[in-house]
Image (spheres, helix red, strand yellow):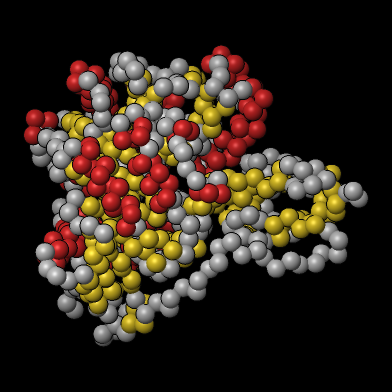
Amino acid sequence: MAKEFSLTPEDVSDIVAIISSSGFDQLEVSTTRFRLILSRKNEGWTQEWTWNEVSEVEGAGTPTATKLSSAPTRDLDAAAAPVEYGGLAPVTAPLPGTFYRSPQPGAPPYVTEGDAVEEGTILGIIETMKLMSPVTAAGRGTIAQILVSNGMPIDAETTLMLIRPDPS
Amino acid sequence: MIRRLFIANRGEIALRIIRTARRMGIKSILGCSEADVHSLPARVADEVVRVGPAPSSQSYLSIDRVIAAARSARACAIHPGYGFLSENAEFAGAVAAAGIIFVGPDVSSLKAMGDKLKARAVAREAGLPVVPGGAGATRAEVRARANDTGYPLLLKAVAGGGGRGIKRVDNPEQLDSQIDLAMAEALAAFGDSRIYVERYIAHGRHVEVQLLGDGNEAIHLGTRDCSIQRRFQKLLEEAPAPGIPDANRRAIHSAATSLARALRYRGAGTVEFLVDAQNFDFYFLEMNARIQVEHPVTEEITGVDLIEQQLLVADGQPLGFSQDQVFLQGHALEVRINAEDWRADFRPSPGKVSKAVWPAGAAIRVDSHACSGAAVPPYYDSLLGKLIVSGTDRAAAVNRLRGALQLIEIEGVHSTVDLHRAIVADPRFIRAELTTRFFEGLQYG
């Protein structure tokens, strides 16, 4: 099987050098594997790469290619729809990652069901991209229910715990 | 020569290693987790082997799984990249025991430099000055050491490196909670929760020296300045370190090569120093016995392919050139673009990159696995890519960087591009007034 065609960064620099002095503002290179768009912008050039899905079947002939569907636009600041918890206040994860109930393995958990908490009490830690972020209580109350286990991978907005707020 | 190279890493560095392997006619085998099977490195590698599930502990950090995968792929060598197992002496030993070449230094160097306390002792023995501080085996001892060292101080991971697991403590009231967080991060990042104390030096510059050794000879490839950091994570690096008088620069080079020779160091490594911004006194911080994220700026000013040099040394060859054949020309800058919402305290922003437009052209280099449609999994670090520019001098490089940053468009995840636009516009940056406190004084949105 012939080696698949690909472009190195050096190739891209060479191509940009060639088309810079032309009248062209854009060059697109499309293969079954990828699409590269080089565009003139301001005083320079940009590169945008998109790689296509290729079937992974071993020994297939010409690999079939389906373009990656364009990602649905994520409204990164959209608030989650409110969920009712029968008067209990949910503690939601501010970001995705792995949830830990204790500061380190073997140590007692930050909180257990029945504990009293107040604003700023640390309830757990979420590890995301190597960063440890504390999860804190928003107000005074008692831990009514802990919904996730130690070391569990969680998404952003996952409800981690339910707190019974103190009557104000 | 090595024929089949297993890459036990991911993201931009995996891509970087594949590129050099391809140039050298070496087959690249990417060992990746489930979360990375559709990544750009996986598409570009000659072969792909799944090492394990997404969480690092079950894949990239699992010695057994990585070696099993490399064996199943009949690899003759493993390149560990940076982070993960790259400085893990047990891993290097297990690789050798499996009859595979480890692309990195000897186990003895990894042991000496991997334990940051031991590294300080070895450096002191080799005649290098070190930053005042010390260790404690228990929380109580760490507290006592903190008392001796005085505030502000730093808590650092003994098994650490790469700026991870470092906490700055400004007063005794903060100490206990910072000890907890430092130990937790150390455990998560390095599998070892031990920490030590180090004095925080107020007007210091982080200056490091790139080294290459073959076990007999060691040479340096100049300095890099990595002072612009946020919470000990480098944001921008440049080569060479600007504004250091020649005599001091030579002393720093010399200290670094002394340490490499004392270790009989094999491969690529970097000695990090804290340099007083006013009088250029310098102190040994640590040695990174691996390739570093910021290696491209040194490559741009020397013309040396550091990954290639690593592979040649790993293959048993002596260094192909001597110190007087190393020439530093011009100036290079690198910015790290991270998937973080810098307006929200740099909260990590995993997800999917819907669009990634990077600059291209003369003296512009992009080392990135983030293409349009790429996934950014939440299990690993937040680095999207590195933009590296060079110029005949620093002013030209800064100018080029300013223009290149204007061309980047990342959509679908938050990114730190705007932050770098602010750094490059900062008068202190333009005047090369660099200290590790640079970031605190940065005016941004």
Task: Mark yes or no: residue B3 visible.
Answer: no
Q: Residue at x 60, y 46 (%)?
A: A133
Q: Residue at x 26, y 86 (%)?
A: A61
- Provide residue B266's location: percent of width, then percent of height: 24, 36
Foreground of the two, A102 or A144? A144
Foreground of the two, A46 or A142? A46
Q: In this image, B48 relative to B321: left or right? A: right
- Provide residue B164's location: percent of width, then percent of height: 47, 39
Q: In this image, B25 relative to A49: left or right? A: left
- Measured along the vertical axis of the image, is residue B127 above or below residue B219? above
- Provide residue B173's location: percent of width, then percent of height: 67, 25
Foreground of the two, B27 or B145? B145
Q: Residue at x 15, y 40 (%)?
A: B392
- Examine the image and state in which quarter residue B390 appears: top left
Task: Mark yes or no: residue B275 visible.
Answer: yes
Residue at the right extreme, as displayed: A167
Q: In this image, B322 relative to B138: left or right? A: left
- Provide residue A100's location: percent of width, then percent of height: 65, 49
Q: Residue at x 50, y 71 (%)?
A: A73
- Measured along the vertical axis of the image, is residue B209 above or below residue B81? above
- Examine the image and state in which quarter residue B303 appears: top left
